């Protein structure tokens, strides 16, 4: 991938960062916002479901949902270091045969990735400049449930994002953090026929949302 943000993703989310994430995951389990998302999805029913996890990092979502009854998963990640560590950990847990791994920008790969019952993007929308393309293409892939963890739309997250981006610019990283407006994200998801069924703030930074295609 040639775009500056994709190069930034590869270097920021490299193998060393992924291994540190995995150590943290083994010690403490999923991050709080991820746990909230997992609980909400499990309440809606995941037995026998197919999962498409975009930007899955070390694979916290499939590592939880496959043993809990999901049938299979596809993990699409733009960072090769994360993808390799996710695959190794799934192998170690005897789950890798139920996961398909794809390296690349989901927006570019979307036409070639099959839809799934459940689509998740956990702390991914904040990594991508073209929210409409990423959220639009991923929401269209969700047959039943669509779960997101993304930044709350507050002055604090916008300010934090600006400070974080200034730090990244100083280190010459081409990665940038994006606080996309909640109303814009919601409009793109709803325009694909999904309806909101769950919302919870997780601390100052994140919000967790679930949408359903069958909700009235
Ligand atoms: C902040 S990490 C989050 C990892 C994991 N979901 C978590 O919450 O711990 C963002 C991940 O999204 C991936 N990512 C961002 N934009 C992407 C895109 N357009 N297509 C595929 N992966 C993407 C990055 O490579 C990275 O692995």
Image (cartoon, rainbow, N blue to C red):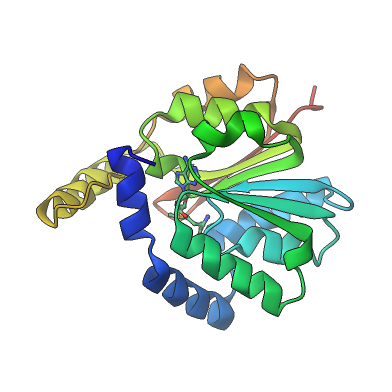
Quadrant placement of the N terminus: top left
Q: Residue furthest bottom?
A: 27
The answer to whether any part of residue 144 appears in the image is yes
In the picture provided, is 89 more to the left or to the right than 207?
right
* Nearer to us in this view, 216 or 77: 77
Q: Residue drawn 55% across and 78% down?
A: 28
Q: Quadrant of residue 119?
A: top right
Q: Residue 86: x and y, percent?
A: 58, 66
Q: Is residue 150 above or below residue 164?
A: above
Kindly tell me whether residue 31 is visible in this rendering: no
Give me the residue at 68% from left, 70% from top.
90
Q: Image quarter for residue 12? A: bottom left
Task: State left or right for residue 196 relative to residue 156.
Answer: right
Q: Quadrant of residue 179?
A: top left
Question: Which quarter of the image is occupied by the C terminus?
Answer: top right
In this view, the residue farthest toward the top is 191
Q: Residue furthest left?
A: 170
In the image, 124 versus 174, the foreground residue is 174
The x, y position of residue 215, in whole percent, is 79, 27
Q: Residue at x 39, y 44 (%)?
A: 127
Q: Is residue 5 left or right of residue 116?
A: left
Give coordinates of residue 147: x percent, y percent. 64, 42
Looking at the picture, how far across and down is residue 43, in whole percent? 80, 51
Q: Using the image, determine if residue 130 lies above or below residue 103.
A: above
What residue is at 59 percent from the left and 32 percent from the top?
110
> How many numbered discs?
0
């Amino acid at each position: 991938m040639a775009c500056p943000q994709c190069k930034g993703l590869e270097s920021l989310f490299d193998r060393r960062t992924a291994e540190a994430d995995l150590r943290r995951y083994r010690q403490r389990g999923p991050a709080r916002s991820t746990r909230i998302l997992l609980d909400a999805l499990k309440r809606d029913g995941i037995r026998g479901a197919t999962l498409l996890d975009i930007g899955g990092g070390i694979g916290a979502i499939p590592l939880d949902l496959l043993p809990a009854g999901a049938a299979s998963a596809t993990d699409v990640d733009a960072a090769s270091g994360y993808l390799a560590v996710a695959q190794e950990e799934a192998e170690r847990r005897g789950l890798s045969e139920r996961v398909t791994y794809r390296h690349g920008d989901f927006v570019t790969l979307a036409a070639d990735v099959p839809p799934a019952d459940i689509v998740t993007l956990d702390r991914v929308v904040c990594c991508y400049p073209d929210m409409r393309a990423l959220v639009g293409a991923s929401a269209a892939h969700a047959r039943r449930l669509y779960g997101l963890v993304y930044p709350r739309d507050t002055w604090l997250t916008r300010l934090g994002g600006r400070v974080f981006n200034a730090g990244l610019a100083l280190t010459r990283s081409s990665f940038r953090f994006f606080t996309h407006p909640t109303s814009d994200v919601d409009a793109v998801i709803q325009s694909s026929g999904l309806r909101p069924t769950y919302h919870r703030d997780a601390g100052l930074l994140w919000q967790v949302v679930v949408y359903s295609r069958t909700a009235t």
